[in-house]
Amino acid sequence: MEKRVFKRKIYDAIGEWKRKSNGQTALLIEGARRIGKSTIVEKFAKEEYRSYILIDFNKASQEVKSLFNDLMDLDFIFLRLQQIYSKILYDRQSVIIFDEVQTCPKARQAIKYLVQDGRYDYIETGSLISIKKNTEGITIPSEEDRIQMYPMDYEEFRWALGDTATFPLLQIFWDKKMPLGAAHREAQKNLRLYMLVGGMPQAVNAYLDTNNLQAVDEAKRRIIRLYEEDFIKIDPTERVSKLFMSIPSILARNVSRYVPSSVIGEVEENKEMELLKSLEDSKTVNMSHHADDPNVGLPTTANYDKFKLYVGDTGLFITLAFWDKDFTENVIYDKLLTDKLPVNLGYVYENLIAQMLVASGNKLFYHTWPKDEKHYYEVDFLLSRGAKLCPVEVKSSGYKAHASLDAFSAKYSSRIKDRYLIYTKDLAREEETLYVPAYMTPLL
């Protein structure tokens, strides 16, 4: 398999940190396993510094880890690191990378003093950063800026395929609120390919190497099994793993909230919260909270006991949805790609839109309220724009009905800026509703 280093937007964000910080803080890049954190950080170090040392704490010797237990002699620590890694460090021209820093908490605690020393820059990468066993007994450094990294977003995926034209063109059509016309069908097909492959670099690599979606599926299954192993380390009872693996089936039921007890049975409230926090800290999921009184400042009305869970990568979501087999057959992928699989894909599109909104910098919120004694209205996502809200409803087809949007608009008319229905047809406007093709979601 060819080793590729994909272009990622976070590269520019790291560069912005380097310019602004000028050695005054370290940078911590958080994110799920296998999203490309180490790869992009090493690329940045090679291109933006005179030299660098990358310490992978999953592989580092006990001697390397023990260097951070005693910080009285920093000269000795730097000398040993240069000897061990056969690299020369230069004042204010070198960076030291703490890769998978969660596995060496003492190194993370040392950041305070290393930054104060001022000789070098420091970039940390990690997953499961905040879970109890990785923070217990250490002082979290305040000299630490954080950036969240996600799987490759749709634009990055198109870049990986050699397509740098699609998004600048989509931006033009979006700004003018013009339909794509004859180009829409191809644009929708390209989006379905992203749904199937996803944004995990290993899966994208497999697609580019083989042009075979079964090979892609095998790559995704390896990642999911890795996640399962991580979850078992956190919770040997496998309850965290069950919460993760159940997400597609829960979304397919179209329920108004995720109820953990329906998956893992009744547990003490504190334990349930701990399990959910561990899952959230793994960065493998996107959590959407219910806004009880939707208004600007959505977090102030969020109900943290009422939420939905989405898989952080829709490619992984697709594989989880067909986890009943040892592999997902090519015929299923072919039918998904051509939009001919005879199942309701609403839950897949909802997961995709959640992923796209998060990658664009949005926090996820939704709202439900009673329609009658047995039914309820639901707005899938709420976006805060200026002093107003933009309600979003998601459809997996070209169906234009939007009863929930209408009811929400009637109830909260003074709070609404724009209202969107995301669906599979071309861009259109009818009265107050803008119908948005799913591939334009990142432009909202």
Image (tube, rainbow, N blue to C red):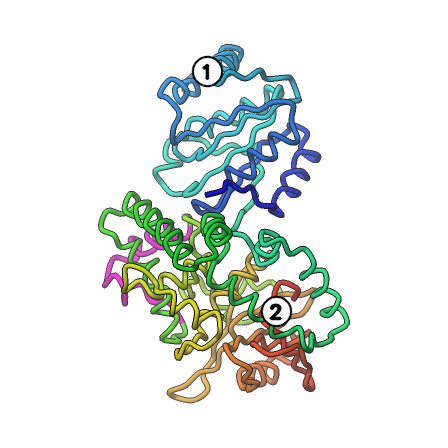
Position of 335 relative to 232 (above/below): below
Q: Position of residue 313 (x, y in %)?
A: 46, 57
The residue sitting at 49% across, 12% down in the picture is 83
Specify whether residue 274 is painted magenta.
Answer: yes
The residue sitting at 43% across, 69% down in the picture is 334
Visible residue check, residue 236: yes
Residue that badge 1 annotates: 84
Report the span colored magenta. Answer: 257-280
Amino acid bearing label 2 = Ala
Task: Using the rendered view, name the quadrant where residue 285 is placed.
Answer: bottom left
Prevailing secondary structure class for the magenta stretch in the rendered image: helix
User: Label 2 neighbourhood size at 10 Å, few (<14), some (14-19), many (20+)?
Assistant: some
Relative placement, left or right, of 320 versus 23 is left
> In terms of secondary structure, where does tag 1 sit?
helix
The residue sitting at 67% across, 55% down in the picture is 164
Task: Using the rendered view, name the quadrant where residue 407 is placed.
Answer: bottom right
> In terms of secondary structure, where does tag 2 sit?
helix
The nearer-to-camera label among 2 and 1 is 2
Query: Nearer the N terminus, badge 2 or badge 1?
Result: 1
Quadrant where the C terminus sits is bottom right
Q: Nearer the viewer, residue 250 or 404?
A: 250
Q: Position of residue 137 (x, y in %)?
A: 37, 31
Specify whether residue 103 is painted magenta.
Answer: no
Amino acid bearing label 1 = Ile
User: Label 1 neighbourhood size at 10 Å, few (<14), some (14-19), many (20+)?
Assistant: few
Relative placement, left or right, of 138 versus 433 is left
Residue that badge 2 annotates: 187
Residue found at the very far bottom of the displayed protein: 372
